[in-house]
Structure formats: C-alpha cells, structure tokens
Image: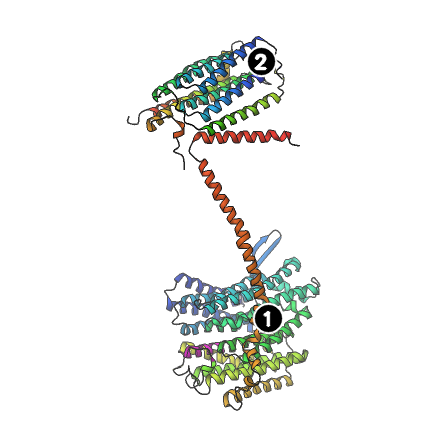
Amino acid sequence: MFNIDFTGEFAAFFVFSAIMICGAVLMISLEKVVHMVVSMAAVFLGLAGMFVLLEAEFVAFVQVLIYAGAVSILMIFGIMMTKHQGAEREKAKPLHEALAAIGALCLFGVLFYAIRSTTFPEPAPFQAGEDNTMAIGELLYTGYVVPFELLSVLLTVAFIGAIVLAKKEAD
Amino acid sequence: MLPSYLTMAAILFCIGLYGALAKRNAVIVLLSLELMLNAVNLNLIAFSKYGVVPSLTGQIFSLFTITVAAAEAAIGVAILIALFRMRGTVNVDEFDKMRR
Amino acid sequence: MDMYTQAAWLVPLFPLAAFLLLTALGRGFRKAGALIGSAGALAAFVLSLLIVVERLGEGAVDYNNAIDWIAIGDYTLRIGFEVTNLTAMMLVVVTLVSFLVNLYSAGYMKNDERITVFYGYVSLFTFSMLGLVLSDNLLSLYIFWELVGVCSFLLVGFWYTKPKARAAAKKAFIVTRIGDAGLLLGILLLFWYMPDHALDFTTIQSVFDGQSGAITTGITTLIALLIFLGAIGKSGQFPLHVWLPDAMEGPTPISALIHAATMVAAGVFLIARTYDIFQDSAAAMETVAYVGGFTAIFAATVALAQNDIKRILAYSTVSQLGYMMMALGLGSLTGGVFHLFTHAFFKALLFLGAGSVIHAVHTQNIHEMGGLASKMRVTAWTFAVGALALSGIPPFSGFWSKDMILTAAIETNPLLFVVGLAAAFCTALYMARLFFLVFMGKPGSASADAHEAPAVMTAPLVVLAVLAAAAGFVETPWNGWFGSWLSGEAEAAHGSGVAIVASIAVGLLGLYVGWLIYGKGGVSRKAAAERAPWLVKLLENGYYADELYAAVIVKPIRTIGSVLMVVDEYIIGGLVRLAGIATAYAGRTAARLQNGQVQTYGLAAAIGFVVLVAAIVGRRFWP
C-alpha cells in the first residue's frame, strides 16, 4: 500500500506536510486567536511549497501573496477590529464538538478509503511549459478570458460590498 | 505520488470541516473555510500534474478558486465587523436570529 | 311546414330561463316569482300546443336533430332532441299541467316565505321534465331523469323545517336511486352490446325492431328488466312504491305536478320510449304486466283504508301507474300512454282539489272534514268530475282509457283482467268514500269556517275538470284516432262488449257500495273494522311495507354500518390519529433542531453526507 520510494520529492513532501498538519492542528487547538492566525499562515506557506513541488510555481507565488499575505493580514485586521479579549471563551458544548469530530473523522475515513482503493492510471508526462507563468497567462487570455473578466467583476463587487457592509451605519 | 497528495488534501479538508463546525469564534470559522478551500486547491494542482491528462487547466482553476476565496474572505470579515457592531460579539453561538 | 317542430328545443328553455331569472332575483321579488314562473310555463305550453297542432295533420314524420357532444377516439356521443307524436303529446301534458300548477300555486303558496324559491324549483323541474321528454338518446334522458329526481327531492323537502318532510325527501331520493341504479346498468349494458355503441332511440328501434339478432334474447331481457327497474323506482311500482305516499309531505301543487301527472309518469314514458326492447322479450313484458297488475290491486286496497286525503290520492296514483304498466306489459302501448294522458288530467285535478280543501280546512284527515260541498261549490263539482273519471264512469276520460286496458287484458290474459276489474272496483269504492266523507254529510270538526279558494286556484280546477271530462274522446272503441296518431299505423278497431259492460258495472257497483256505506249510511262504517280489525290495520299501514323494509333491509344495513363505524372510529381513526400524533411529535423534535445555529445545520449536513456516501459505498459490500 505504502510503497514509498524515497525520492527528493518525497522528502520535501514529507517536510511540507508535517508543517501543514502541525499548523492546522495548532490552528484548531490554540487558545489565542492571533496565534491561530499565525499558525494558519504556516499552513498556507506549506501549501505554497507543495505547489512548487507540483510544478505550479505561479500558483505557489499567488498563494504566498494572497493567502499568506492578504488573507492572513485581513483576518488579523478582523480580529483587531472586533476587539477580542485575545482568547476564545470556551463554552461547554461537548456533544456538538464530539459529533463534529466524529463527522470529520468519518468523512476522512471515507475519503481515505476511496483514495486508497482507487487505482490511478499512469499519467502522461506533464508539460508545465518552459515558463509556467507565461503559459498560464496565455491560457488565461485566450481560452479562459470570459471567466477571467467575470472574476474581475466579482472582485469589484466584493470590494464595494465589503466597504458598504463594514462602514459605520451613522455615515 | 498522487495518493499522498490527495490524502494530504483530505486531512486538511477534514480539519477545516471540524474547525468550521466546532469553533465558536467567527474569525476562526472563516479561517477554517479558507483551509477547506486550500485543500481543494491542492487537489486541483495535484491532478493537474498527475491526472490522466495533465494540463494547466487545474492550475487555472485553482487561481480562480483563490480569487473567489479572497473575495469571500473580504466579504466575510466585513460581515463579521458589521455583526460585531450590532451584537457586540463574534461568537457564532449567539448568531441565532433565524431561529423560528 | 314543420317549423314549430324544429323549434321544439326551445320548449325546455323557457322554464330554464324562468328558473335562472328567479334564482338571480332572489327572495325579494315575491310577486314577480309567480309571474315569471307562470310566464315560462305558459310560453312552453303555447309552443308545445303549436307543435301538436302542426303534427295533427297527415304524415307528420319524426323529427330528430342532434349535435356532436363528446368525441372519444372513434366514438362520438351525440346529443339532441327528437319530436315524435308521443313526445309531442307529453310536451303538451307536462307544460299544461305545469302552467296550471304554477297558476294554482300563486294562490296556494301565497303566504309562504320562500315562494320565489318554490317557483324556481318548479321551473327547474319543468325544464328537466321537458328535457327528459325531448331527449333523443338514453344518456341525456338519464341525465334529465336524475334532474327531475333532484327537483322532486327539493320540492318534497320544501318545508324542510318539518322533520317528516325531511325524512320523506330523503326517502324519495334514496328509494328512487335504487331504481336509477338499475336504469344506469341497463344503459351501460345497452351501450356495451349495441352496434356502434349507439344509444339514440332511432337506432335502438331499428336494432330491436328489425329482429337483426344483434343482441341475444337473454341480454335483451336483462336490459329490459334493468330499464324497468328504473321505471319501478320512478313510477312508484311495487316494491319501490313506498316513497310516493310519503312524498305527500311536499306542498300539494307539487304532489299534483310531480307525483301525479308528470314525473311519476316518466317511468311509463321511458318504457313507451324503449318499447321495442321490451317487445323483443316476452319474459320482460310479462314481468312488466304482472308487476303493474299487482301494484294496481295492491295500492288500490291500501287506499281503501287511508285517512289522509293526500295519501289516498297517492296510493291511487300508485295503483293507476300500475294500470299503465300492466297495459304496456300486455302489449297495448296505446292503452298505457292513453291512460297516462287522461290520468295526468284527472289526477292533477284531484290533487289540486284536495289542495283547495286542505287550504280551506287546514287538515288532511278526511274524518275531520265533511259537508264541504255547500261551502266550496267549484271545488266539489270539479272534484266530483275527477272522481268519476278516476272511477271509470262513462263518458269521463278515465273510462275510455281504463276500458282500453281492460280490453287488452281480456284478450291476452284473463287473470290480469280480473285483477284489473278488482282494482277498478276498489278505485271506485275509495273515491266514493273520499268524496262522501269530504264533501257530503254532516260538517266535520274542521269544516266550520271553510270557504271557497280564490279564483286563481279554482280556474285551473275548472280547466282540468273540462279536460278530465272530455279528453277521453280522442280514443274510443269506435274511434282509434289517438292510437293511430301515436303509433303511426292504423290500429284495428278494438273494443270488447264484455270489457265495457264489466268495467261500467264494476265502477258503478263501487260507487254504489261507497254511497251505501259513507253516503246513505245503510251499512255501518264500522262493519269491516269490527269483523276484521287486523285487515283494516294491515291496509292502513300499507301491508306494513315500510316496516318490512325496515326490518329486512334497513336494520341489517344499519347494523353493518355501526360495526363499520366502530372499525372506522377505532381502527382507521386510530391510525389517522396515530399518524397525526407521530407527525406532531416529529414536528416538535424537528423544531428543536431548528435552533438558528449555522453550525448545527452544517453539522447535520456533514453527517448526512457521510451517511449517504457510506450507504453508497456500503452497497459494494452488500451481496
């Protein structure tokens, strides 16, 4: 099942996944909200590394910029603006939490079973392009130009919407 | 190598799911949602390299996902701030106005 | 040439328009009610009269006009009207009696609160009856057949605040339904077996008349008997006669219109209309004859002992309808229809006269009346004419038609001839009893301040009296005009000396005996009651038919009903309640889930998804 040949990719994968799982688990279990966000940033960075492993350099770059940068900062802003005491006040709701854990675990079990019991066909060699960024850019402005433009509209709407929602009522 | 990536994505997704369902702080719930979206991105990129027909389409899609996720995070935080202004808390438990 | 005949479809529309107008106007327009109702009936009557006059000439052909009604695949149902001499005659009878009753009701129902509603119902009934008469196929006839039933129900229960009227209305409806079910089955059978599923009378006539053998004798008999079952219900023949005496709870003009002249004759009309079917089956003909004969004598004896003026007339109606059925069963179509024709006039006359009496003395018990002749001259004279016509005394109309039936009987079935004679004797006897008790002798307890009815009520009586006296001359032993007009072929001269003499003798004898007992007082009235009290009791209660039905049919059904009720209450109702309780409980539980927490919803969705996927995956491991 785990017929691992110890390659460089595997070593890197192992390191990154260790970082990500640690970050994710810490995110769940830490007390202070700011710490949670920081551990989350670690997950984002680990994921960016994994993207590099998968020959998606441009996406990895974007991941670092947007997630590890923008989203994390946004979250910290959110925390600051909502004046947290810094720690989460735990209210006892054990049944709910236990059920959520069981549900998540079961889902993982199902997914794991699915992944392990599937035989993936041998992939064709991957042509990432000499310049990954350029290849993506060409594809974006040819085949995916309409979704791309729609996304720009979406971003504008989200931008305006966020301002409208967050501004003070009195203004 | 593909199953390893997929398993990794599944782990991230399930941790995100647990966070989104069990955490009380709305900011953390938003973060957990981001984690789930990231897990999906990992899947997309992994299939883009190791899929039956490897192509850049997976990467393009993950770019789109990232964009949408960024917009979602912005709106989410904005809603959070508005809610906080009205209710004085970000505890998800207390957002139960839709009850009945 | 036959302009009016082609416009016959207009006849029912006048009363229909009157009904719609009256319904639209509401209860406020009391004066307008009588006016509109009478006008509708009068217009219909005038047109009917024109049609008949037009058809009196030589060579009037049946006129039929139909349009496509429903097309189902290849089968097309047509609806239309047909004017034959029979239907033309019925048109005149129905519209004339209806008009006179409308007129009469203006006086009789003057003080009723719902007089407008009453006129609406009467107009609706007239419309339905005319539609029934004009129908050119059995299906539309059946529709109108049910419509007149509904009108009868509405009018019998018109005074619905009286419990007895309510019960009578229900009884009339339910009992006639038994017959209607038979008629419907007959129509369905006919539809099944007829070539091309035709239901119009023209095709029925050609199929059965031509002896084409398209339908076997057994099926023909079955169809004929089922149709006859409908006629039994509607025309109050034994054993479904029980509703007709009770139906007298309705207003008296209604008894005259519906339960004497028109609707109850619909059964006779139906058989006359489908006579070709009956003629194909000797068994069915015999059944009709014997049921009719038995009903005639059965009801006539019951009428002897009744004390309610309207019930006497009701049983008399049953008896006379039995006469008509007997005539039809004996093969004398003309005799049956002729008696229907004359009976409509003199029985309507008698009922309206009875209504006039009731109007004056406010009771229906004949022993409380007496000596009314001097106070109500017009009523008394016209009633006498009606009584003589009913008793079969020449030259009044009843004699000629009854004689024709008896002649038919003596030629084919001596047993029924004797039965007919006995019934005729009883008829004369009870009419003499009725007349002498009500109009002659010492004034009774209720007749002190009796006075003649207003002219609007006596005028119809006079018109009907003239007709009751003279209508018989269209068909006499030496003049077969009516029969040949009706059937379209020259009928052989009929008439049997024995029948004439016997019928006159029996009628006179009955009247004489009645006069002896109730007029002169030569024989004690109590004689019969003293010698055979059980017999009087038996007759008073109509041979206990109601009680018998109650014991044999109603009780067991009621027992089954109460058992089923328990089943319904505790088992089915319990299940329903259980479902209700379970749903309410589930609702309360589910409402608790609805706590407004997004995370709970998300959790439920996630667990649900996992279970779903697990179920799908689990199927792999299932054998």
The mark found on residue A126 in the picture is 2
Question: For residue C219, what is the image quadrant?
Answer: bottom right
For the point 67% across and 78% down, which residue is it?
C413
Of residues C616 and C309, which is closer to you in this image?
C616
The residue under the point 60% across, 55% down is C76
Residue C188: percent from left, percent from top:
62, 59
User: Where residue C485 appears, x then y in whole percent?
Assistant: 59, 74
Count of marks placed on residues: 2
Frontmost residue, A20 versus C520: A20
Tag on residue C239?
A: 1
The chain under label 1 reads C
Task: For label 2, count other residues whose C-alpha is less than 10 Å away and answer few (under 14), some (14-19) or many (20+).
Answer: some
Q: Magenta residues, as a range?
A: C348-365
Quarter occupied by the C terminus of chain C: top right
Say what amino acid the circle numbered 1 marks: Pro
Magenta region includes residue C335 = no
Protein chain holding label 2: A
The image position of residue C284, as x and y in percent, is 66, 69
Q: Quadrant of residue C224?
A: bottom right
Is residue C54 among what the camera can see?
A: no
Which-is-in-front pick, marks 2 and 1?
Answer: 1
Q: Is residue C150 above or below residue C369?
A: above
The location of residue C417, given as percent across then percent down, is 64, 80
Q: How is the image coloured?
A: rainbow
Cα–Cα gap, marks 2 and 1 = 98 Å
Regarding residue B24, the answer to whether it shows in the image is yes
Q: Judge left or right: residue C48 versus residue C214.
A: left
Task: For mark 1, give the secondary structure.
Answer: loop
Amino acid on which disc 2 is placed:
Phe
Say yes or no: labels 2 and 1 on the same chain: no
Residue depicted at x 68% and y 68%: C280
